[in-house]
Amino acid sequence: MALVTTAEVCDANPQLLVSGELRALQPVFQIYGRRQVFSGPVVTLKVFEDNVLVREFLEEKGNGRVLVVDGGGSKRCAILGGNPVVQAQNNGWAGIVVNGCIRDVDEINSCDIGVRALASHPVKANKKGIGEKHVPVTLAGTRILDGEYLYADTDGILISKTELSV
């Protein structure tokens, strides 16, 4: 999709909003990373205070995908740090959305990738490798499925069942 704003996408697709094919996440995420506008097919992951699977995903080639991590909304530790974000940037991920916290904000903000998270936190996550890949997740009041499309800018985050063009 050409660079259009999420507001323009909503304005151009009111029928998709009514049907639920296009959904807006509640505005709970902070903006990190140098890329404020990003989009791509979604890969889902569900973890809780554990970042082993997050790191494993970001070590793969991203091919313009967006990793959506349901971290259970925990604000007790960070499940994403600077090193994995650098790796994600280098491996071609378009962005990362985390329903949880991040750390190493200065390093993340120097990366050309889009990152959204609830907050920053200095404490590291656990390293147990527990979680679920490619499962439905719910972030900011919105159910998100593996393979859907995410569109993010400074106005917010949209999820679509199909790739959109305006």
Image (spheres, rainbow, N blue to C red):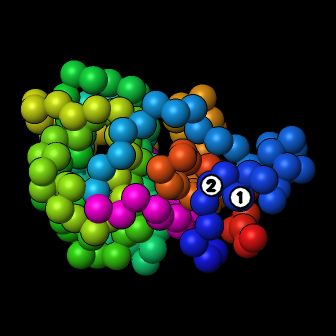
- Nearer the observer, 24 or 12: 12
Depth check: 56 or 79 in front? 79
Q: Which residue is drawn at 89% across and 50% down?
A: 15
Q: State which quarter of the image contains the C terminus.
A: bottom right
Task: Tell me residue 84's x, y (percent).
Answer: 19, 58
* Residue under the image location 82 percent in, 56 percent down: 13
Q: What's the distance in space between the residues labelled 2 and 1, CA to CA?
A: 5 Å
Q: Which amino acid does label 2 sit on?
A: Thr
| Secondary element type, mark 2 | helix
Placement of the N terminus among the 4 image quadrants: bottom right
Q: In this view, does 125 lie to the left or right of 24?
A: left
Q: Nearer the viewer, residue 20 or 7?
A: 7
Label placed on residue 161: none
Q: Are marks 2 and 1 in contact (CB under 8 Å)?
A: yes
Residue shown at 87%/44% (left/top)?
Answer: 19
Whether 116 is among the magenta residues is no
Q: Work out whether residue 37 can be spotted.
A: yes
Residue 54: x and y in percent read 29, 51
Left or right, 20 with respect to 155, comes to: right
Q: Judge by depth and name the residue closer to the eye, 134 or 121.
A: 121
The picture places residue 130, in percent across and down from the top left corner, at 30, 39
Q: In which quarter of the image is residue 71?
A: top left
Q: Which amino acid does label 1 sit on?
A: Val
Examine the rendered structure and indicate whether residue 23 appears above or below residue 150: above
Task: Tell me where the magenta segment starts and ends, as one range.
Answer: 34-45
- Which label was assigned to residue 9? 1
Q: How crowded is mark 2: few (under 14 residues within 10 Å), some or many (20 or more)?
A: some
Disc 1 secondary structure class: helix
What's the mark number on residue 6? 2
Q: In this view, does 137 lie above or below 110?
A: above
Could you tell whether 92 is left or right of 163 in the image? left
Residue 47, image x and y in percent?
36, 37
